[in-house]
Image: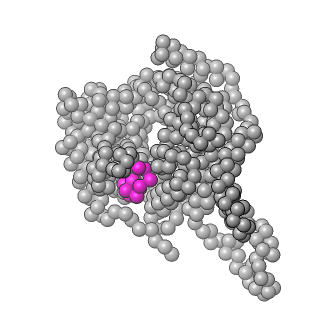
Amino acid sequence: MFSQSLLLTDDDLQRIEDAALRILAEAGMRFESERLLDYLEAGGARIDPARYRAFLSEEMVDRTFEALKPPTEEHDVSRLVSREMGEEFSLDFGYEAFFLYDWPQKDRRRADESDIIELIKLGDVIPEVGTVGLPVLNSRTDQRMEALEAVALLLRYTGKHRGAGIRTPAQVPYMIEIDQLLGHTATNPHFVQTGRCMISPLSFGADACGIFEALIDNGYDKSFWVATMPIAGGTSPVTAAGTVAVLVAEIIGGWVLAKCINPEAVVEASIISGAMDMRRVSASFAAPEALLQDIAVAEFFRRRYGMKVGYEPGYIDAKVPGLQAAYEKTYKQMALGLCLGPALTVGGLEGCATFSPTQAMLEIDLNQGLWRFFQGIDCSDERLATDEIIAACNADLKSFMQTDHTLDNYREALWDPEFLLRGPWTDGATEWTQANSLLDAADEKWRELLKHYTPPEVDEDQLREVEAVIDRARAELCG
């Protein structure tokens, strides 16, 4: 049987930890909030108030990890493929992208509310989609209202809804009020997101700090998450190891803050690193360096502290649907899946700045194949089919297509892609035409799916209460 190799040696883990601890102690982290600095100072940090920096000692970090409770079992690194996929194939739908890729126009464009409603409906009607967020941002709405207005649309048009990204501290109380109207609390938030992204290197900006403060003020201090997105050669060292040290230090620093706020808080983190393309002066998220960085950080926290951190395979470099997008998404999802455990996403282009429903159709097809691969092989008696093999040989059968076992099991046993071209050669013109019309077929597929959309059952009274909160927020936040 194949065995899965680890990326880091025990010595590597120690060196990364030593580097991260030294960074936190000697460079510190910037928190643009006097209040959060007070929490850190009470926890033992040395504070430079003029620079908004907190210097975190090794003792503080040790106390933080002593208080952590690993939420899940260690990933099985003895197997080539993982069995963590679950029984049902399920995907998330929504990236909060800035642009929508319009396949018929062969161009990206800004989206409006009608586009967003259409995409929410699409996510709802796709059987393989388990959760629907905001696929693309509304270019015609005030960003102070974006996340709140998205809630009303999600409630109206899908039963699979999840939270949309809170942008500013001022949005937090209204989002909490909406959550509470829907029966959610601080221990089980739904639309309320209890975290924020770092600004590399080692900085928690004013908005991020303000969101933490607003959560604390409203009793939402039971869980916190932090995300980090350094770019090697840009906002972190050009070497993969140096970027890993920054990633690890930023996550540890965020978790130390969370535990200083509430020692009982559950903490999480997610990572999306990239690498600077020096020739084009742009970030690459599908480069091998970026994958190595993400894998190293996730492996570090699993092996060193028994903690899982999230990773995102949807960030790729391709700007349009097609061969590069499929290549990068497959490469990234396979690499992360084999090393860490599977994570499947659909629709994101250009570092998730653009969303494409056309590409999403292809990737649903692709991801079904990856999902089957990551499930591994079932060696039960039914799957081994020993009796069928013996019976077929004794009957001198030349093909198992003649057996009842094949008829009973082929749908579940075999991946049947909808868009990939299989079968015998026809002629050059036909093969060329089919290969080049693949994306046209994918674009046609999502438009056809929309014809079968059925609105979810909606509690109109509850929705009116939510909309009243949104109207009040609009008046108070935007005048």
Q: Is residue 154 left or right of residue 238?
A: right
Q: Majority secondary structure of the magenta segment?
A: helix
Q: Residue at x 70, y 62 (%)?
A: 429
Q: Which residue is located at x 57 percent, y 40 percent?
A: 107
- The part of the image, by quadrant, that contains residue 240 is bottom left
Residue 190 image position (x, y, % from top left): 54, 34
The answer to whether residue 160 is seen in the rendering is: no
| Above or below for 355 versus 141 | below
Q: 50 above or below 224?
A: above
Magenta stretch in the rendered image: 284-295
Residue 334 can be seen, yes or no: yes
Which scheme is used to colour this image of the protein? one colour
357 and 341: which is toward the camera: 357
Q: Position of residue 417 (x, y in %)?
A: 67, 59
**Residue 344, position as x, y percentages in the image:** 54, 52
Residue nearest the viewer, comparing 106 with 207: 106
